[in-house]
């Protein structure tokens, strides 16, 4: 691919990311992304032969963003593995709440071709990072299973918080106390508590 091809490919993905943020996953059509990029409605097919490939490229941007945020959060965290797990969990929830459209697309594996388009190369290392920290925080635990259960719990918190169901049920407007409870449920009580 030459530079102009790469630039147009990136512009198509940029337009998809912006459209996703503004209108949600249902708005991501090849025709609308082409219109917003200022190219013919057939032009995206040159770079993305299927709609799934374009959706996967857009989701790839989300995974890269989440990975960047996760690594920044870990770089700022000075505590041990449990504090690092907490920092990752908070970052995950903030990401989900800041960009619900991207978050939804990233985890819609029914929509994405994650196996052969490289999404797993971005998403699985994040999961492995979480599992490794859990293994350090809770020696002897089946870290991958605990990470899976924690991830599922965080995903539910993100959805229910976005829908305002948890605020109604708990009376909280800050998810921090709920996150502490989730972490205690999966990692055990914090030392000294």
Image (tube, rainbow, N blue to C red):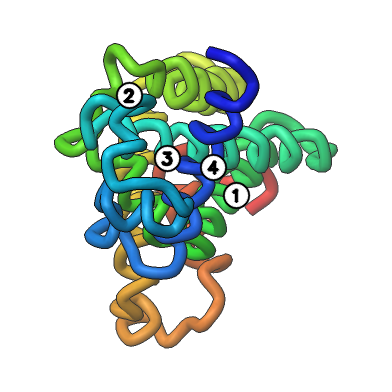
Query: Would you say 50 lies left or right of 131 here?
Result: left
Query: Would you say 72 lies left or right of 116 here?
Result: right
Crowding near pointer 4: few (<14 within 10 Å), some, many (20+)? some
Secondary structure under badge 2? helix
Q: Report the Cα–Cα distance between label 1 and label 4.
A: 27 Å
Crowding near pointer 2: few (<14 within 10 Å), some, many (20+)? few
Nearer the observer, disc 1 or disc 4? 4
Q: Position of residue 170 (x, y in %)?
A: 38, 80
Q: Residue 58's mark?
A: 3
Question: For mark 4, what is the residue?
Answer: 11
In depth, the one of 191 and 11 nearer the eye is 11
Residue 72: image quadrant is: top right
Question: For mark 1, what is the residue?
Answer: 91
Q: Report the Cα–Cα distance between label 4 and label 2.
A: 39 Å
Looking at the image, residue 24 lies above or below residue 166? above
Q: Where is residue 14 in the image (x, y as percent from the top left)?
A: 53, 47
Of mark 3 and mark 4, the one earlier in the sequence is 4
Residue 65: image quadrant is: top right
Question: For mark 2, what is the residue?
Answer: 145
Q: Which residue is drawn at 37% across and 49% down?
A: 34
Secondary structure under badge 4? helix
Nearer the observer, disc 2 or disc 3? 3
Q: Report the Cα–Cα distance between label 3 and label 4.
A: 11 Å
């Amino acid at each position: 691919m030459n530079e102009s091809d790469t630039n147009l490919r990136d512009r198509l993905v940029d337009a998809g990311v912006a459209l996703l943020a503004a209108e949600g996953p249902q708005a991501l059509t090849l025709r609308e992304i082409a219109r917003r990029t200022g190219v013919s409605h057939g032009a995206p097919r040159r770079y993305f032969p299927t709609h799934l490939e374009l959706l996967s490229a857009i989701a790839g941007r989300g995974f890269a963003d989440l990975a960047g945020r996760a690594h920044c959060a870990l770089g700022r965290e000075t505590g041990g593995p449990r504090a690092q797990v907490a920092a990752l969990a908070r970052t995950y929830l903030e990401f989900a709440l800041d960009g619900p459209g991207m978050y939804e697309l990233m985890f819609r594996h029914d929509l994405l071709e994650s196996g052969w388009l490289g999404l797993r190369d971005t998403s699985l290392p994040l999961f492995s990072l979480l599992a490794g920290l859990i293994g350090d925080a809770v020696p002897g635990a089946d870290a991958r299973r605990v990470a899976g259960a924690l991830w599922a719990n965080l995903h539910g918190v993100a959805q229910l918080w976005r829908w305002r169901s948890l605020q109604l049920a708990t009376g909280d407007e800050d998810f921090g106390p709920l996150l502490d409870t989730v972490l205690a449920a999966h990692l055990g009580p914090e030392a000294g508590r």
